Amino acid sequence: MERPPRKFEDLQVGETRQSQPRTVTVDEIVRFAREYDPQWFHSDPDAARESHFGEVVASGVHVLAIWRQLDHTMNSDIDFVCGIGFDEFRLEHALRPGDTVTARSEVLELKPSSSRNDRGTAITQYFLTNQRGETVLRFRSINLVYRRHSAG
């Protein structure tokens, strides 16, 4: 498999991208929860009717996994070294069965590394938004991105 073509130098502050929509089903929510986050209001549709939400909702871990899947479809052409952190991570609205979400990214800051000339840091704001325009998830991601040419 070839490395992604877009390097640090190709990114621009203010650059935005949006994913295709993705609809979440009750079966998916329950299946994910039973495997990875078996709290009753994620994994038991009958019991969840008595919860604050009135139905099963996706766990935060599941919401993040969905975001990651969508992010890969819109930003997989970037040659990332790795992600090194999240800031201001917020789950603002529940992700419910039948919701259709899209991911959006915006590059906020680009800074060449002062210690490694083969990479730079990209700060990106991410959103996961449902069909009602509600923000389900938002956070800032700190990522290292390979440079095309090492500064020397």
Image: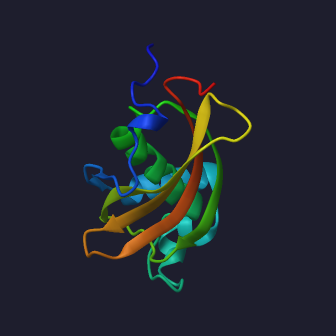
Q: Residue at x 49, y 64 (%)?
A: 58
- Give the number of marks: 0
62 and 90: which one is in front?
90
54 and 123: which one is in front?
123
Q: Residue furthest right?
A: 115
Does 104 sit above or below residue 12? below
Q: Position of residue 144 (x, y in %)?
A: 60, 40
> What is the basis of the colouring in this image?
rainbow
Visible residue check, residue 140: yes
Does 119 sit above or below residue 97? above
Visible residue check, residue 43: no
Q: Residue at x 43, y 70 (%)?
A: 136
Does 92 sit above or below residue 64? below
Q: Quadrant of residue 104?
A: bottom left
Does 60 sit above or below residue 81? below
Q: Residue furthest front?
A: 152
Q: Position of residue 50 (x, y in %)?
A: 52, 84
Q: Is residue 69 left or right of 42 when viewed as pictured?
A: left
Q: Is residue 71 left or right of 90 when viewed as pictured?
A: left
Q: Position of residue 98 (x, y in %)?
A: 30, 64
Q: Position of residue 28 (x, y in %)?
A: 43, 52
Q: Residue at x 59, y 24 (%)?
A: 150
- What quarter of the picture does the N terminus occupy? top left
Q: Is residue 94 left or right of 103 when viewed as pictured?
A: right
- What quarter of the picture does the C terminus occupy? top right
Q: Residue at x 52, y 86 (%)?
A: 52
